[in-house]
Image (spheres, coloured by chain):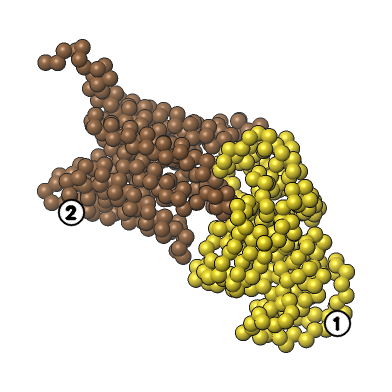
Chain colours: A yellow, B brown
Amino acid sequence: MSLIATRNLTLRIGGQTVLRDVDIAVERGEIVTIVGPNGSGKSSLLRALIGALKPASGTITRAADLRIGYVPQKLQIDATLPLTVHGFLNLPRRQPRETIAQALLQAGVTDLAKKQMTDLSGGQFQRVLLARALLNKPHILILDEATQGLDQPGSAAFYRQIEEVRRDMGCAVLMVSHDLHVVMAASDRVLCLNGHVCCEGTPEIVADAPEYRALFGTGTQGALALYRHEHSHSHDHAHDHSHMHDHDHDHAQGHTHGAGCNHAHGDQDA
Amino acid sequence: MVPAATTPMGTKMLDDFLIRAGLAGIGVAFAAAPLGCFVVWRRMAYFGDATSHAALLGVALALAFELPIFAGVLLVALSMALIVTALNGRSLGTDTLLGVLAHGALAIGLVAVSLLPNQRVDLSAYLFGEILAVTKTDLAIIWSGAVLSIALLVWRWQALLSSTLNPDLATASGVNPRREQLILTLALAVTVAVAIKVVGALLIAAMLIIPAAAARPFARTPEVMAMTACIIGMIAALGGLAASFTLDTPTGPSIVSVAAVLFMLSSGVAPLLKR
């Protein structure tokens, strides 16, 4: 049985549908990464999984007694709130000192317990958030763009930490990421989201999927296109994208993607 | 005549209006200061304004229906706090919305009091407080409210802090942020209701925010900040009372003035406390 699964999950925020008919499942111990452009519903999906956003329709099934460790996208601590790392890790439930020390160690930091949260560097802060998510020995870690604001080496180190945690604790990992090269290297499975599940599968399959490349390939301007060359797949064939404009799609097709990602895209040849 | 031996010393002490005033001030400071920390941390200053300004409408209601002032204020403050909570997050900027509610409630309250038939209401008592006229019953109500408000905060302290920090994170840990918001709302309404007699509707929000803000530089944990705010609030209450008595100034504003001076002093030493 899956740790957590959704069936026909549709999410609305303020009357706007941000996600439609999403079926996903995360199995024990696997690393699943969600990619997708801004506003594609990635964070909303995670918020629904942790119970912070009620589904407009569809269901979310959690394994019995599922323990979730959640690392939010950003955590703005108001400058008026004095809070030590130790105090932070005791919220909402007080923890034994050893538990806290162990979680910090697993997250790759030590000697921080007495520091003020607002005095931490970006990398330290993310690790403290990770430590907090590890406190309850989660079955699944859910991370929402946990490396936002970290530089390249910083985020690479953070993802190595995540893999280490997975290896040591055996927990599944579901994360949203913008670091496509990391995604390709570290994930068992990738889910490409754009209002619905565009395509999913192993990193290799997704990287070759036209939907994915339409979102992240040369057609989209900006830095994302750079990553395209960092994985070893050949991109030498031009795609026929006629189906991409079929917005009234259904998912009954026999391949791994649903057509109709709402985006503009250019030529796909490399 | 009652023999002295049968009168408990405490009761006799309470016969002195200055002592009653002092105890009332301390009670309000204790109720307002820890709650004020949450108001500051959650950036709810305007929320406090809206709720406390609505208190005047509660006064009008109480006078019109011959209810105890405390009950009327509690009712209206609670309704206002719930309305604000419900409207929070709607399309109109929350700042704007709370501004409308805060000033609207105050204006409507003033109009409502003036419309009361056959009443010669001393408006300034409700706007600026009347701490020197606190009765023993008032004192009992103030301290009950203070104890209730503090008990609510202590009971939910960790959960309140969690949901203040990040609602999603709280949800993921099994805390319901909406419920915690309601607890704060309730504590706020109770505090407003007990504070109106002491500092008046206009300045209740000041007793929430200023001691908390003044306490910030001295604290490295939320708990220490709340306790420091209590002490600062207490000093402001007693100092303001003394100033009001000797200078014959209105008490509410005097208390808040002392609090403001303490805030300035605290801001002055704040840079020295940084390593």
Q: What residue do we see at 66% from left, 41% from top? A: A119
The chain to which mark 2 is attached is B
- Residue B122, placed above or below residue A154: above
Counting labels gives 2
Are dots 2 and 1 in contact, CB under 8 Å?
no
Quadrant of the snapshot with the N terminus of chain B: top left
Judge depth for marks 2 and 1 and give the one in front: 1
Where residue A136 appears, as percent x and y from the top left, is 64, 45
**Point 80% across, 64% down: residue:** A184
Identify the residue at horizontal 20%, vertical 45% (top origin): B67
Q: Residue A260: in sight, yes or no?
A: no
Q: Which quarter of the rendered picture does the C terminus of chain B lie within?
A: top right
Mark 2 crowd level (few <14, some 14–19, many ≥20, 10 Å Cα): few
Q: Nearer the viewer, residue A55 or B233?
A: A55
Q: Are marks 2 and 1 on the same chain?
A: no
| Identity, as a three-letter code, of the amino acid under mark 2 | Leu
Say if A53 sits above or below A91 in the image. below
The secondary element bearing badge 1 is classed as: loop
Q: Which residue is mark 2?
A: B115
Going by the numbered disc 1, the residue's amino acid type is His
Figure quadrant of residue B270: top right
Q: Residue at x 44, y 58 (%)?
A: B88
Q: Is residue B192 left or right of residue B217?
A: left
Pick the front one: B71 or B266: B71
* Secondary structure of residue under mark 2: helix
Q: Which residue is mark 1?
A: A237
Q: Is residue A188 left or right of residue A126?
A: right
The vertical placement of A205 against B263, above or below, is: below
**Whole-percent x and y of residue B162?**
54, 45
**Front in this rendered view, residue A14 or B39:** A14
- Name the spot of residue A115 as percent of width and height, x first: 66, 36
